[in-house]
Amino acid sequence: MVGIEILRFFSAFAVLVWHYQHFFFRPETASIDVVRDTQPLYGWLHPFYDFGWLGVNVFWTISGFIFFNRYLSKIVARQVSGGLFFLNRFSRLYPLHIVTLVAVALLQAYYVRENHAFFVYPYNTPYDFFVNVIFASGWLTPYTDSFNGPVWSVSTEIVIYVAFFLLARFFRIGLGWTLLIMCLAAAAGGLLIHQHVKGSESNIVFCAFYFFMGGAVHLIYERLRDVIEAHRRATVLLCCAGYAALFAVCAVFGGTKYLAATVIAPISIVLLHAIEPWIPERFASPIAKLGNTTYSSYLIHFPLQLTTVIVLQRLGMSSATLAMSPWFLLAYLIAVFVLARWVYQALEAPAQTFLRRRLAWIGGRSQRGAAN
């Protein structure tokens, strides 16, 4: 799914730009001190500087689309066991998570010794480390800003993976069930927003909404596949009209960031799926490689930021000063994606293969057709 890889890459890019503000962290006040519109290339990148955190919501939607596409029918047909499903998720996510967790723990220990404050994410107790070890930082504590902070959204998604598998296995969920779950999650999310509730409850509810919305997009797309393929250009025009309508609503009413994240993800998925046959074959491999860097870039960018800040301090330089330069921003983005590509090749892929071979007994009878 080359089109989906494009969307994954831009979602990762959005989060990287949103977290660029970390370079302006002040240990003396334990806060980020930056005027957002003074960050480099703000005129070009302001949607990412202002709303890049919504890339997480788009990631959740993409995950729902992919899981329903790759797993739903196989789980319903009992071709994928619970053991195999767990093994695939564990081998895909855990190796890089534990490596970056240990790296951040060591780096934070050095940083707090020199600065008397933790860098950006303040909750780094032994209990928080344990919570991160079991991949539960997004739902077992009322806060998410501990150790390698960005991983909270992945840990929250794990809860939804379990719910998805159980619903597929025991309820054989289809479009009706999926839309019902979306409506229940939307109602619960609206109630939590109204009551100003934040924490594990809201994390799980919002993740469920976006994940199952992605699943609903897949199920609807499959029902309309013949129509879409027969009227591909019309589909593209409808998606563009959807973008225009969304931007118009946001411009007129403002304060519609959740609406934007909710609508732009499914429109983008349909659009990129529709244009996929038009993407030249020579671009497919580079795009797939970019898509493969998304998880790595998501988990390594904070350790890279922390390392950069420590090195600059040792050299007597201020990250906040250097980060005002567009060249520093460019170097940061290039470094993240280049390192992410290397990490995928040197750690992620080999570790995944190793674990699936050594723990194949967990998967049961066969691993043929297993998804990433």
Image (cartoon, grey):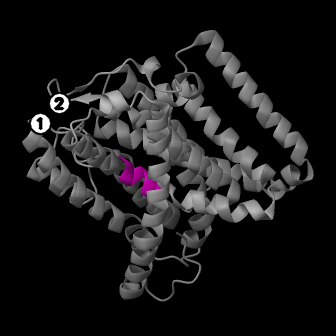
Between 81 and 101, the one nearer to me in the picture = 101
For mark 2, does the 10 Å Cα neighbourhood hold few (<14), some (14 to 19), or many (20 or more) residues? some
Q: Which residue is mark 2?
A: 27
For mark 1, does the 10 Å Cα neighbourhood hold few (<14), some (14 to 19), or many (20 or more) residues? few
- Occupied quadrant, residue 29: top left
Q: Label the magenta part by its dominant secondary structure.
A: helix
Q: Secondary structure at mark 2?
A: loop
User: Which mark identifies residue 115?
Assistant: 1
The residue shown at (54%, 61%) is 292
The residue shown at (57%, 49%) is 9
Residue 129 point in image, percent of width and height: 16, 54
Establish if 267 lies above or below 89: above
Residue 309 point in image, percent of width and height: 27, 41
User: Which mark identifies residue 83?
Assistant: none
Establish if 50 lies above or below 90: above
Residue 252 point in image, percent of width and height: 65, 10
Q: Which residues are magenta?
A: 295-301
